[in-house]
Image: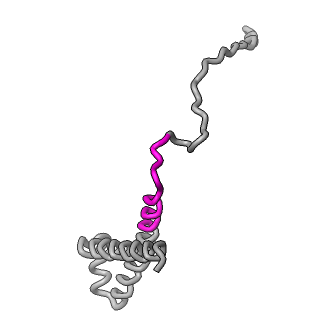
Amino acid sequence: MPELIRLYIVNVLIGFALALVFVTGLVWLDVAHLRHLITETSGGLLAFILLVLLNGVVFAGVQFGIAVMRMAEDDGGAEGGPGTPVLEPVPVRIRAVTRPQPQRRHR
């Protein structure tokens, strides 16, 4: 199996496991009375499954994104990549021009 596919599958499984823990925690802590809604209604099991599934999609995507971003090699150089010039601040004299103030008329 290609390494990238294996990486994807492993991180998706980790994401869904995290989603299961997250939703179980929400139900166990009775956040927004979810425990009552899931245990006392006829569609409670479906609601639990959908919560895990939809949170699993989000958690799996985030987990895979983190895994891909961690694969970047650190070159240890300056930011901006090779060949980026190092800019030094140089003071520049700017002449200030004032506009004549309009005269006020006294009544």
Above or below, 48 against 89 in this view is below
Q: As drawn, is 52 to the left or to the right of 77?
A: left
Q: How many numbered discs?
A: 0
Q: As drawn, is 60 to the left or to the right of 98?
A: left
Q: The C terminus lies in which quarter of the figure? A: top right
Residue 50 visible somewhere in the drawing: yes
Looking at the picture, how far across and down is residue 51, in whole percent? 39, 78
Looking at the picture, how far across and down is residue 42, in whole percent? 34, 91
User: Which quarter of the figure has residue 31?
Assistant: bottom left
For the point 41% across and 67% down, the residue is 63
User: Which quarter of the figure has residue 16?
Assistant: bottom left
Looking at the picture, how far across and down is residue 100, in whole percent? 75, 11
State the scheme by which the image is colored: one colour
For the point 34% across and 87% down, the residue is 45
Q: Most extreme residue toward the left, as rendered?
A: 28
Residue 55 visible somewhere in the drawing: no
Look at the image and give the residue range highlighted in magenta. 62-77
For the point 33% across and 75% down, the residue is 17
For the point 50% across and 39% down, the residue is 78
User: Which quarter of the figure has residue 60?
Assistant: bottom left
